[in-house]
Image (tube, rainbow, N blue to C red):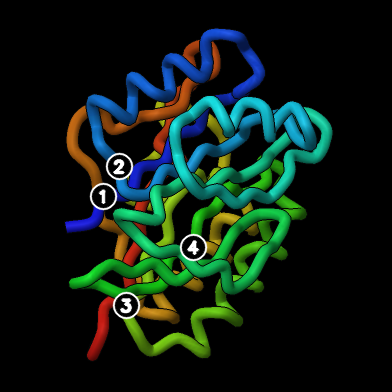
Amino acid sequence: MLSILTWNCQGAGKRKFPRLCRDFCRNNKPDLLVILEPRISGKRADYVIKKLGFSNSHRVEARGFAGGIWLLWDESRVQVSILFNHPQFIHTRVSDLDHSFLFTAIYASPQECWRKFLWSNLAALASSISEPWILGGDFNAVLSGLKRKNNFGRQGLANKLFLDSMADKNLLDLGFSGYKCTWKSGSKRARLDRFIVTVLGG
């Protein structure tokens, strides 16, 4: 079974990051690693990626110190074809000897106005897909069943569009194990990262 891991590292420019990433991969053995919000780009990103121990990589550059998506994999274990780049996602086909499916790595903008464009683009993409599809990453959105702790505001229009698009396109949140909140700021907590799959034949 293929293993895909996403990691919102909130900055890959620190000296200790390559070692932490290699240790992380040694312990978890991902076939495909998605690094979100590296906050570096260009030659500096090239330098760090070369230290991470993968034979192949592809990325959407960070914009200044915001965003960015890195995909890393070993071609001897898995094949990844890049189908489409977007400032907030990378759409791919992933395959090995036993599996083939579409995978979209997502880092949604923290700004609600930009997330609306992401949801509309994903909805348009979903309308043309009739095969297994996995979406994973940081959606910067909270599903209605997983409300933020400490009254962390309303969901907002952009998040409602996200929920509506999930229902319309027959997408299912895979859920989680362990602590339900993976993001915090002071006393505020939320789960913003998730994996979502298509429910075929539904």
Tell me the mark number nearer the camera, choosing from 2 and 3: 2
- Quadrant including the C terminus: bottom left
Question: Which amino acid is tagged 2?
Answer: Pro
| Pointer 3 or 1: first along the chain | 1
| Pointer 2 or 3: first along the chain | 2
Which element is circle 3 on?
A: loop
Verify CB contact (< 8 Å) between mark 1 and mark 2. Answer: yes
Nearer-the-camera pick, 81 or 85: 81
| Pointer 1 or 4: first along the chain | 1
Q: Residue at x 54, y 17 (%)?
A: 185
Q: Which mark is residue 3?
A: 1
Mark 2 to mark 3 CA distance (whole Å): 20 Å
- Quadrant including the N terminus: bottom left
- Residue 33: x and y in percent read 41, 43
- Residue 166: x and y in percent read 43, 70
Q: Which mark is residue 30?
A: 2
Say above or below: 132 vs 189.
below
Q: Residue at x 26, y 77 (%)?
A: 199
Nearer-the-camera pick, 124 or 91: 91
Q: Residues within 10 Å of mark 1 (few under 14, many from 20)?
A: few
| Pointer 4 or 3: first along the chain | 4
Mark 2 to mark 4 CA distance (whole Å): 16 Å
The answer to whether residue 57 is seen in the rendering is yes
Mark 4 to mark 3 CA distance (whole Å): 11 Å
| Pointer 1 or 2: first along the chain | 1
Question: Which amino acid is tagged 4?
Answer: Thr
Which residue was labeled with disc 3? 132
Which residue was labeled with disc 4? 104
Which element is circle 2 on?
A: loop
Which element is circle 1 on?
A: loop
